[in-house]
Amino acid sequence: MNRFFGTSKPKEPAPTIDDAIAKADARSGSIRAKIDKFDTELVKFQKQLKNMREGPAKNSIRQRAVKVLQQKKMYESQLNQIEQQAFNMESAKLASENMQNTIVQIKTMEQTNKMLKKQYKDVDIEKIYKLQDEMADLLEDTNEIQELMGRSYNVPDDVNEQDLDAELEALEAEWNFEQENKPEAETPSYLDDLNSKLPSAGNINLSELDKELDDIANKPNTGNLENVTS
């Protein structure tokens, strides 16, 4: 069947703006190369004309230089057009990208708006106000309870600095009286027994003293001596 009717050629992909910009850049690069070549030829003609006398030969070279200059002007005009076209396409590309970004942002905002509306359906503003009021009342009641629990009883409120100074002086006098009439402390009996067992200081050296103290500390059933050693 394909022999009689043939097959349709696959469609070529539509050119993109990037392809158009790339072609314009390549075309402008080629034209710049030609313009540079014309500049080289014009410099060469300029050197020749500078060293030649007026005559047919100089006029011939001048005509050739004029033709080269005309071609250069033509290519420069084309270059300006291509560069302007490339600039317009780049501007269009930038505008298209900005528009795509804007569309994405709009879609995102729409989805976020839908999500927020759905979430706010489960939120009751009046209920929040009520909860806030209840919390404030509960905190106020709690503070009042704490103040009641910390209230002091039978504490006079009319105490001044003079009463305080008088009370402190009385306490100081009482303490001084107790210290003056306090009997001297008696030496415990277990210390007397310990002193009787120790030899006189004139007949003992440090090593003997340490040994005697160790024996007393390690002696079993020492009774009150445990309290002394501790």
Image (tube, rainbow, N blue to C red):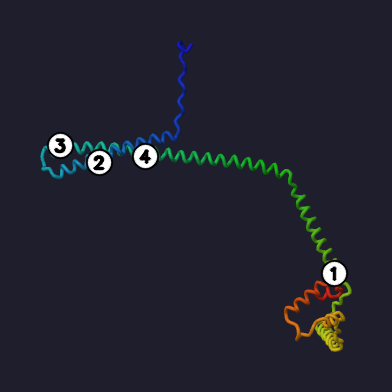
In the drawing, does residue 226 fall left or right of residue 30? Answer: right
Coordinates of residue 94 in the picture (x, y in percent): 47, 41
Q: Residues at badges 2 and 1 in contact (C-beta under 8 Å)? A: no
- According to the picture, the residue beneath numbered tag 1 turns out to be 151
Coordinates of residue 9 in the picture (x, y in percent): 45, 20
Q: Separation of disc 1 and disc 3 at Cα?
A: 123 Å
Decide which of tag 2 and tag 1 comes sooner along the chain: 2
Q: Separation of disc 2 and disc 3 at Cα?
A: 18 Å
Residue at point 80%, 81% (across, down): 198
Q: Separation of disc 4 and disc 2 at Cα?
A: 20 Å
The kind of secondary structure element at disc 1 is loop
Coordinates of residue 22 in the picture (x, y in percent): 40, 36
Decide which of tag 4 and tag 2 comes sooner along the chain: 2
User: Mark number for residue 173?
Assistant: none
Callout 2 amino acid: Asp
The kind of secondary structure element at disc 3 is helix
Callout 4 amino acid: Glu
User: Mark number for residue 83?
Assistant: 4
The image quadrant of residue 133 is bottom right
The kind of secondary structure element at disc 2 is helix
10 Å neighbourhood of mark 2: few (<14), some, or many (≥20)? some
Seen in the picture, residue 220 relative to 80 is either above or below; the reply is: below
Q: Separation of disc 2 and disc 1 at Cα?
A: 105 Å
User: Mark number for residue 39?
Assistant: 2
Decide which of tag 3 and tag 4 comes sooner along the chain: 3
- According to the picture, the residue beneath numbered tag 3 turns out to be 60
